[in-house]
Amino acid sequence: MVENTKETAVESTTPETIDVHLTADQASMIEEILNNYTYGYRSDHDVDCKREIVKKDKIGTYPYPAKAPDPSIKKPVYDWINDKWNDKSEDGINKLFENVNTLVADNKEKDNQIQDLQKAILESNKSNTMLGMQFNAFGQQVTGILKQVQEAVNDLKPQKDNETPEKAEETETKPTDGNGDAK
């Protein structure tokens, strides 16, 4: 036998509004609370994280951080030095240790890279020094050769300073008669 079930909507019998009778002092006090107070999250050396009603001007000052903790954090505690919420749960601490280990490994790698760069710079400096010494030796050789060339050129010059090389050639190549005239 098959039963037919029919769902029916149940209407709420509670009213959506509530009539409250307040005195003027009570209304003023409620208005002041609504204008000047809000929820904040306290985090200090006594309390890791506790939601409290505080004056609005206290939010963002110790012990009430400006931002609420991320809902994904299991046991929030505020790090006032780094201005952030941390997870005090075992998972959060394990993640923190992983981050520390990663930073340590990265630092070791960077230290090795720095040492390699320092070695390369030292080798480069040695090479530059050797090149400088070789360049100086080459310069001295070139200077010596130029000095020898200058001496050889000076040896080829005619004995008389006022005689030009063309006149020297004319006197050497042209035969003369007995009177000193060219033939």
Image (spheres, grey):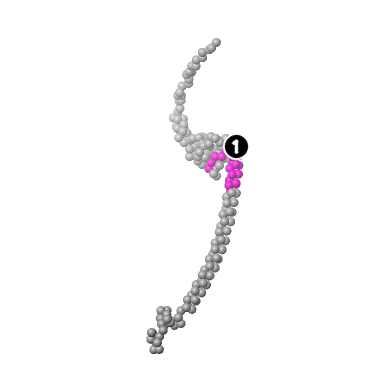
Q: Residue at x 59, y 54 (%)?
A: 115
Q: Residue at x 54, y 63 (%)?
A: 131
Residue 6: percent from the left, percent from the top?
A: 50, 15
Give the residue type that dot 1 points to. Answer: Asp
Residue 162: percent from the left, percent from the top?
A: 41, 82
- Above or below residue 116? Residue 144 is below
Q: Residue at x 54, y 44 (%)?
A: 82
In the picture, the quarter occupied by the N terminus is top right
At numbered mark 1, what does the secondary structure look like: helix, strand or loop? helix
Residue 180: which quarter of the image?
Answer: bottom left
Residue pushed farthest bottom? 179
Residue 99: which quarter of the image?
Answer: top right
Q: Is residue 101 magenta?
A: yes
**Is residue 16 shown left or right of residue 42?**
left
| Closer to us: 173 or 61 | 173
- Above or below residue 76? Residue 129 is below
Numbered range of the magenta stretch = 83-107
Residue beneath disc 1? 91
Q: Residues within 10 Å of mark 1 (few under 14, many from 20)?
A: few
In the picture, the quarter occupied by the C terminus is bottom left
Q: Is residue 8 magenta?
A: no
Q: Residue at x 59, y 40 (%)?
A: 95
Residue pushed farthest top? 1
**Is residue 163 shown left or right of residue 87?**
left
- Above or below residue 40? Residue 132 is below
Is residue 60 in view from this perspective? Answer: yes
Which SS does the magenta portion mostly show?
A: helix
Is residue 163 in view from this perspective? Answer: no
| Closer to us: 86 or 65 | 86
| Closer to us: 1 or 48 | 1
| Closer to us: 76 or 95 | 95
Residue 107: percent from the left, percent from the top?
A: 58, 48
